[in-house]
Image (cartoon, grey):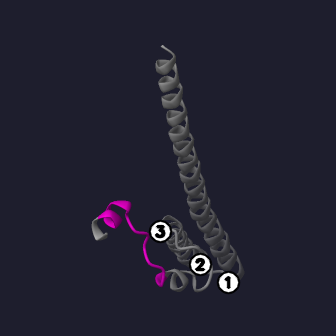
Amino acid sequence: MNEDIQNLDRKLKEASKSHEIADKRNAENVSVGMKAGTELVGCVIVGAALGWGVDTWLGIKPFGLISMLLLGVTAGFVNVWRITQNMGSNVGYSQLHRGEKPAKNPADQGESE
């Protein structure tokens, strides 16, 4: 009876750890999603505002808004792509990590020995 309780306690602890890991991953995914959405919306709004300002300043009514809005949408999608590909925004970030070797799979280590 005591052994069954210990097994149950061990299984509950293992399940709790796996749920904690899943919760952390979900929080990271939500964070990336919020960042991507903010980047996209922000770029579109800034592009539209700049286009409206150019139209007002130069008097070329639809062309400044259309061109800057398209530029903002393009910049937003590029930023979302960079976020989802986990590229980072630092200069030289991708070159820094190209030289790293991928981690070995534990299953592969057993075969090479």
Marks 2/1 in contact by CB < 8 Å: the verdict is yes
Residue displayed at 60% across by 54% down = 31
As measured in the structure, the alpha-carbon distance from the residue carrying label 3 to the one carrying label 1 is 39 Å
Q: Which numbered disc, 3 or 2, marks the residue that appears first in the sequence?
A: 2
Residue displayed at 67% across by 74% down = 50
- The amino acid pointed to by label 3 is Gln
- The amino acid pointed to by label 2 is Gly
Left or right of 15? Residue 35 is right
Q: Which numbered disc, 2 or 1, marks the residue that appears first in the sequence?
A: 1
Left or right of 11? Residue 43 is right
Q: Is residue 49 above or below residue 20?
A: below
Report x, y in % for residue 45. Answer: 63, 64
Marks 3/2 in contact by CB < 8 Å: the verdict is no
Sort mark 2 into few (<14), some (14-19) or many (20+) by Cα contacts within 10 Å: many
For label 3, the residue is: 85
Report the magenta residues as a range: 98-110
- The amino acid pointed to by label 1 is Leu
For label 2, the residue is: 64
As measured in the structure, the alpha-carbon distance from the residue carrying label 3 to the one carrying label 2 is 31 Å
Q: Residue furthest left?
A: 111
Q: Is residue 22 above or below residue 62?
A: above
Q: Quadrant of residue 68?
A: bottom right
Sort mark 3 into few (<14), some (14-19) or many (20+) by Cα contacts within 10 Å: few
Q: From the image, which quarter does the C terminus lie in?
A: bottom left
Q: Which mark is residue 58?
A: 1
Q: Quadrant of residue 20?
A: top right
Q: Which numbered disc, 3 or 1, marks the residue that appears first in the sequence?
A: 1
Q: Secondary structure at mark 1?
A: helix
Q: Nearer the viewer, mark 3 or mark 2?
A: 3
Q: Quadrant of residue 53?
A: bottom right
